[in-house]
Image (cartoon, rainbow, N blue to C red):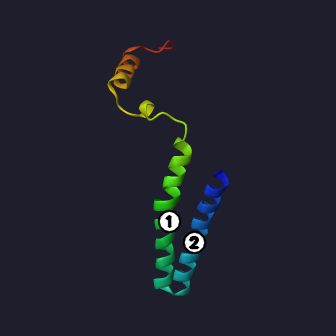
Amino acid sequence: MKYFLRFLFFSILVAIGVGYYFKWQGNHITGDRIVGLAVLASAFILMPIFIFHRSRGKKLKDYTFTKENLDKMKDRKHKKPENQ
């Protein structure tokens, strides 16, 4: 999965570079389409796969604002660190 994500990321970067090369050569419509497709691929393909890959095995409860987590944050805020 890690290598697939890297391949997808670098291929999107190459596609953006190719799109800007087409724009530099004067073919603005094709360049804009290539850059647009690369941006869409990064937003709708790369980002969800990356988020799924990074969040696998983690508990969603640890990252949400529940009553328990808010109480923990309040307790930490009122305690002074030892070095102060």
Whether residue 28 is situated above or below residue 51 in the rendered picture: below
From the viewer's perspective, is residue 80 above or below residue 20?
A: above
The total number of labels drawn is 2
Where is residue 10 drawn, in percent x and y?
62, 63
Residue at (51, 87) in percent of width and height: 27
18 in relation to 71, above or below = below
Residue at 58 percent across and 76 percent down: it is 18
Q: CA distance from mark 2 to mark 1?
A: 10 Å
Question: Along the line of sight, which residue is nearer the eye, 81 or 17?
Answer: 17
- In the shown orientation, is residue 11 left or right of residue 69? right
Whether residue 66 sits left or right of residue 31 in the image: it is left
Above or below — where is 62 with respect to 30?
Answer: above
Residue at 50% x, 65% y: name it: 41
Which x, y percent locates residue 7? 64, 61
Residue at the disc numbered 2: 15
* Residue 54 % position (x, y): 55, 44
In the image, 13 versus 77, the foreground residue is 13
Residue reaching furthest to the right: 3
Residue type beneath disc 2: Ala
For the residues labelled 2 and 1, say whether their Cβ atoms are less than 8 Å apart. yes
- Residue topped by disc 1: 41
Q: Residue furthest top?
A: 82
Left or right: 65 as drawn, with respect to 25: left
Tell which circle, 2 or 1, labels the residue nearer the N-terminal end.
2
Q: Quadrant of residue 15?
A: bottom right
Dot 2 alpha-carbon crowd within 10 angstroms: few under 14, some 14 to 19, many 20 or more: some
Under circle 2, the secondary element is: helix
Mark 1 falls on what kind of element?
helix
Residue type at tag 1 = Ala
